[in-house]
Image (cartoon, rainbow, N blue to C red):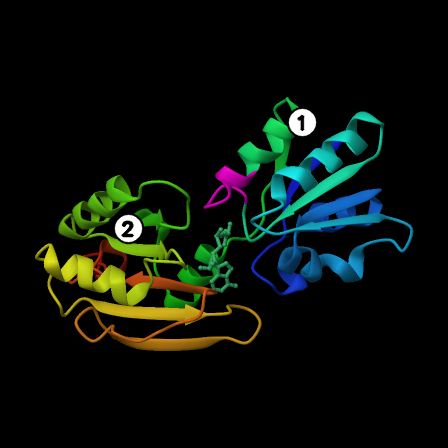
Amino acid sequence: MIICVGAGPGDLGLLTQRGAELVHTADVVAGFDAVVDLVRPLIRSDARIVTMGYRDQVQRLDEVADAHRAGARCVVVFMGDIHFSGFQFLERVERACGERIETVPGISSAQVLASRGRVCFDETTFVTFHRRGTIDPFKRHLVRALEDDRNAIIIPRPWDFMPKDIAAYLLARGVRGDHPVEVWENLTSREAQWVGSLASCTHEFSDMSIMLIRTLRPMPSQIEPEPIA
Ligand SMILES: C[S@@+](CC[C@H](N)C(=O)[O-])C[C@H]1O[C@@H](n2cnc3c(N)ncnc32)[C@H](O)[C@@H]1O
């Protein structure tokens, strides 16, 4: 048995009960070092832990796939939710196992940001640049979303497309500099918030940051309802 579990944004209180049970009953718990560290208090002392980094993930996932074929209950933990900025890793797990794998969703950093910033999903576009390969179509999608008067919640790319690069790109594409912007770091653990505008977003942030660009128009959710006559 093998299952992929979203571990939530950092605070174990935001890991689902189902996810916690699966981690606790697993024979093998695998994932990137920082994510395994989050769920470590739930891992049984006799369980095997397989941690990995970007360089050795394929090799380590092959070990997990072997354990799965040998009948071990394996859980692969993902940061936040699997379904936002997690699919490249999911594809690697599935490639190692040679089959489609069940997923248990988690609470994403994007959901926590939406809650902190009080933005409505329906009026917001979610974009991740945290992926291998070209990000050009996602950049264009972000410009169109802002032109369409939607908020945007954005996961930057730590190695070359951080909030200041995103802001510079958008300004160069004619997006107005007075869009309100927030950047949140380490949500649910050592949170820090920066508030400013697209034009003033020139700061450095850590890899664990997520960005909110607000639309300039009041969204339907911000408009007071008409009194009923
Ligand atoms: C590969 S993406 C995975 C996102 C994850 N699947 C999710 O749903 O939050 C990793 C990036 O998400 C962002 N991120 C994840 N957790 C975060 C948190 N607690 N606070 C701020 N940013 C976070 C950071 O930009 C981090 O580099």
Contact (Cβ within 8 Å) of mark 2 with mark 1: no
Relative placement, left or right, of 73 versus 109 is right
Residue 211: x, y in percent?
Answer: 35, 63
The disc placed on residue 123 is 2
Q: Is mark 2 within 8 Å of ligand 1?
A: no
On the question of residue 226 being in view, the answer is no
Q: Is mark 1 within 8 Å of ligand 1?
A: no
- Determine the residue positioned at 63% across, 22% down: 99
Callout 1 secondary element: helix
Q: Is residue 65 above or below residue 44?
A: above
Relative placement, left or right, of 136 versus 131 is left
Q: Is residue 196 above or below residue 97?
A: below
**Residue furthest to the right:** 46
- Dominant SS of magenta comes to loop
Amino acid of disc 1: Cys
Relative placement, left or right, of 82 versus 133 is right
On the question of residue 148 being in view, the answer is yes
Residue 188: x, y in percent?
Answer: 55, 69
Locate the N terminus by quadrant: top right
Residue 84 within the magenta-colored segment of the rendering: yes
Q: In the image shown, does 67 or 80 lie closer to the viewer?
A: 67
Which residue in the structure is indicated by mark 1? 97
**Residue furthest to the top:** 99
Residue 113: x, y in percent?
Answer: 43, 63
Q: In the image shown, does 172 or 216 lie closer to the viewer?
A: 172
Callout 2 secondary element: helix
Q: Quadrant of residue 166?
A: bottom left
Residue 146 within the magenta-colored segment of the rendering: no
Amino acid of disc 2: Glu
Q: Which residues are magenta?
A: 82-89
